[in-house]
């Protein structure tokens, strides 16, 4: 009986660490969009889309991240962020829409003094971490608002 309680407590703590890590880090991306990062709007215009679509990115990244951190509709925030990241990866890194195909690229290390790394490791972290939050939920630690979507 005590083992099950400790196991559940560890599960909930793991969920907390995951959702706060993914949520806190993605919130900064949302804030960058809102405060003038021109990379996303420039890409949208280059692809023939309105630059104002960047506000969708802000909404998903900022409010989805805050929801995950606080445990408010954490599953919904994780799912929205995961889908958003899938679309962003497809648009910016698939080789379509004038982008370069980065799916199987290793980033060059110009200094040559350490291992090279997978080109899309950060994007994959956000996407897969968000889907993990969507699948696992928020756990007991948080505001627990959102019913089955938390």
Image: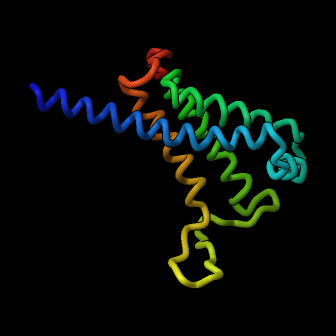
Q: Residue at x 46, y 22 (%)?
A: 150
Is residue 98 or residue 122 the one in the foreground?
122
Q: Is 8 displayed left or right of 42 in the figure? A: left
Q: Is residue 111 above or below residue 17?
A: below
Q: Residue at x 89, y 40 (%)?
A: 50
Q: Is 120 displayed left or right of 8 in the figure? A: right
Colour approach in the figure: rainbow
Q: Which image quadrant for residue 31? A: top right
Residue 126's x, y, as percent? 56, 47
**How many numbered discs?**
0
Q: Residue at x 55, y 34 (%)?
A: 79
Residue 76's x, y, as percent? 54, 27
Q: Is residue 148 above or below residue 114?
A: above
Furthest residue in direction bottom, as rendered: 112
Residue 72's x, y, as percent? 52, 21
Q: Residue at x 70, y 39 (%)?
A: 30
Q: Is residue 139 above or below residue 45?
A: above
Which quarter of the rendering shows the N terminus?
top left
Residue 75's x, y, as percent? 49, 28
């Amino acid at each position: 009986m005590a083992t099950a309680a400790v196991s559940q407590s560890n599960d909930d703590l793991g969920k907390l660490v995951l959702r706060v890590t993914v949520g806190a880090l993605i919130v900064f991306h949302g804030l960058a969009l809102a405060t003038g990062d021109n990379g996303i709007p420039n890409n949208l215009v280059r692809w023939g889309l309105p630059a104002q679509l960047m506000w969708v990115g802000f909404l998903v990244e900022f409010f989805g991240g805050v929801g995950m951190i606080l445990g408010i509709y954490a599953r919904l925030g994780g799912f929205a962020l995961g889908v958003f990241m899938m679309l962003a990866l497809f648009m910016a890194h698939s080789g379509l829409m004038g982008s370069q195909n980065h799916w199987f690229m290793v980033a060059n290390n110009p200094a040559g003094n350490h291992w090279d790394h997978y080109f899309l490791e950060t994007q994959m972290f956000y996407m897969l971490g968000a889907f993990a939050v969507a699948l696992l939920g928020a756990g007991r630690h948080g505001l627990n608002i959102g019913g089955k979507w938390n």
